[in-house]
Each structure stands twice: as C-alpha cells, then as structure tokens.
Amino acid sequence: MKKLFMYFALAVTVLAMPGMAHATEIYGWTLDLSSYGGTTITDIYQLSVYGQGHITQDFGGDGVLSNGDAFSVSSVLYTIGYTDTNGVYYNNPDFGTDLELFFVSDNLAGVITNVAADGSFQYEYQSGTVSLYLGDSSDIAGSTLLADLDLAWGLGDSTSVNLGGNALAGSTDLGLQILTAVLGGLISFDPADYPELAALYPNLSTFFTFDLNNNLNDSGSITNPVFTANGFTATVTTGGDITLVATPEPSTFLILGFGLLGLVGFRRKFKKA
C-alpha cells in the first residue's frame, strides 16, 4: 500500500510540473520569413502593432452590463515596427517587398467580470485564435497564413462604460500559444542565452503576449448612443506591443514522468530478481 501511494504521489508531482514551470521572456529572438518570400529580422525584443476591429457586447437579457455577459471581438493588427534588445525602435521595417506582417482574429470571445459601481469592468477572454499572416492586410485571402495561434489566457480592463461618442480606454493582455519554439524555422532564439531552457530546447511552448491599449468608439453601423436593448457594438482602435515568452511543453514533463515511473518499476523488478 505504501508503494502504491508512492507511485501515485510521483505521478501527481509529474503531472503538476507544467503548472510549476516558469515562463521565460525571450530577448533577442529571430523572425525568419525567407521561406515565404520575406526577410529575416534578428535581435527582436518586441513587435509594435496597430489596428482596428469590432466588439459586440451582450447584456445577457436583463438590459444591463453584468458579470458573465458574453462578448466577441474581431480585429486586424498590422506590425508597424519592432524594438531590438538595445532599445532601438525600427519603424516600418522591411518584412519583404510590399509585404506586411499582421495578425487577424475573428473568433475571440469571453465574458465580462468584475463589474464595479463606478462602471468599470474587465473582459475575460476565454476562447479563440489569432492568425499570423504575411502579405497585404487589406487582402487577407491573398496573403500567406504563417500560423494559427491558440488563446492561452487573456484579460482586458476598461475604465468607463460611457460610450456616448467618447473613447472607452482600457488595456488588453492576451497570451497566444505557438506550439513549438521553432515554428517551421519561423521563430527561433539562441538557447545558450537561457540556461534554464537550453536543455529543453526546442521542446518548448512559446507564447506571444499582447500588451495592448484599446479605445472603443461608435461603430458607425448604429447611431448614438451605442447601447441597445441587447448590448452594444463598437469599433476597437488598438495599439501596443507583443513580446515572446517560452516555457517547457507539457509533453516534455510527461515523457520525463513516464521515464521516472519506468525507472521505479525497473528498480523494483531488479530488487526482486
């Protein structure tokens, strides 16, 4: 019974490892677009983006904004520059002749949380993807899809619900997962710069984290006020920065865990022999 408990405890520890893994922010990563007709940019600290989209907010049937009310967002963010590890900002970098690097989302969704008496609230993103493209942001269909990024986590806040023609300022933090550190050679970094990750490279999960500032305005498709009986629709003007972080993949821990369990079983068998 004691040995069975030991095996169970070991399995729980292994399965808990991904949650304990620390995400490391990557400084000086490389974006290689050469396979798609673009250029290669090195020593990136963060990308800067700007764009516009739409948010549709539901009031949940009671006519007021409440915790749990659903929302959805669609937007296009195009890259306007990047900052290197020396803090130098490059405006309108060359991603390739007449090529833009941009992000498209049309299915991000979540619920409202932390609605306060002063009218402030938070957007809790719960599902959706953001696609990374190279091409022309005004011609998405004619552009090259580089990756679909799954939402890992997301939270955004606002400062006021007074939309009547005025901007609603707030921020958005989104974590969007790239399944491997070396996405077909698209994104890479020098593991020697990160001793805590070097032994696991390239078996890492990497994330783009979006730190964005948003302004919500009248969408133009409806008249003032923006609010209706069922919710509101508004345009979203967005700008901010994107950084890259990395953490060991859960599969790495599972392989390690099965190996440890195998060694325990082997040792037990060996002692019997």
Image (cartoon, rainbow, N blue to C red):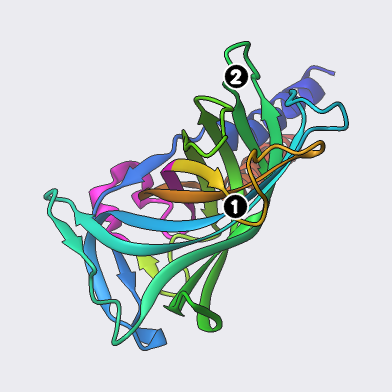
Question: Residue 10 sits in which quadrant?
Answer: top right
Q: Name the residue under label 1.
A: 219
Q: In which quarter of the image is residue 266?
A: top right
Residue 159 sits above or below residue 107 on the image: above
In the depicted structure, whether residue 48 falls above or below residue 174: below
Seen in the image, is 255 located left or right of residue 197? right
Q: How crowded is mark 2: few (under 14 residues within 10 Å), some or many (20 or more)?
A: few
Q: Where is residue 185 in the image (x, y as percent from the top left)?
A: 40, 74
The image quadrant of residue 262 is: top right
Residue at 63 percent across and 11 percent down: it is: 117
Question: Which quadrant of the figure contains the N terminus?
Answer: top right
Looking at the image, is 169 positioned above or below residue 216? above
Mark 1 or 2, closer to the camera: 1
Q: Residue furthest top?
A: 117
83 vs 96, left or right, is left
Q: Residue at x 23, y 70 (%)?
A: 93
Which residue is rendered at x = 57% and y = 21% of the image? Answer: 120
Q: Can residue 271 be seen in this view?
A: yes
Front residue of 272 and 180: 180
Place of residue 43 in the rendered image (x, y in percent of width and height, measured from the top left) = 20, 60
The residue segment tinted magenta is 189-213
- Residue placed at 56% from the left, 28% from the top? 162
- Packing grade of label 1 (10 A; few <14, some 14-19, many >=20) is some
Task: Quote the CA–CA distance across marks 1 and 2.
Answer: 21 Å
Q: Is mark 1 on a helix, strand or loop?
A: loop
CB atoms of marks 1 and 2 within 8 Å = no
Tag 1: residue type?
Ser
Q: Judge from the rendering whether residue 7 lies leftward or rightward of residue 253; answer left or right.
A: right
Nearer to me, 101 or 205? 101
Mark 2 residue type: Gly
- Can you give x and y, in whole percent of width and height, for residue 175 in the image? 52, 45
Which residue is disc 2 drawn over?
Answer: 119
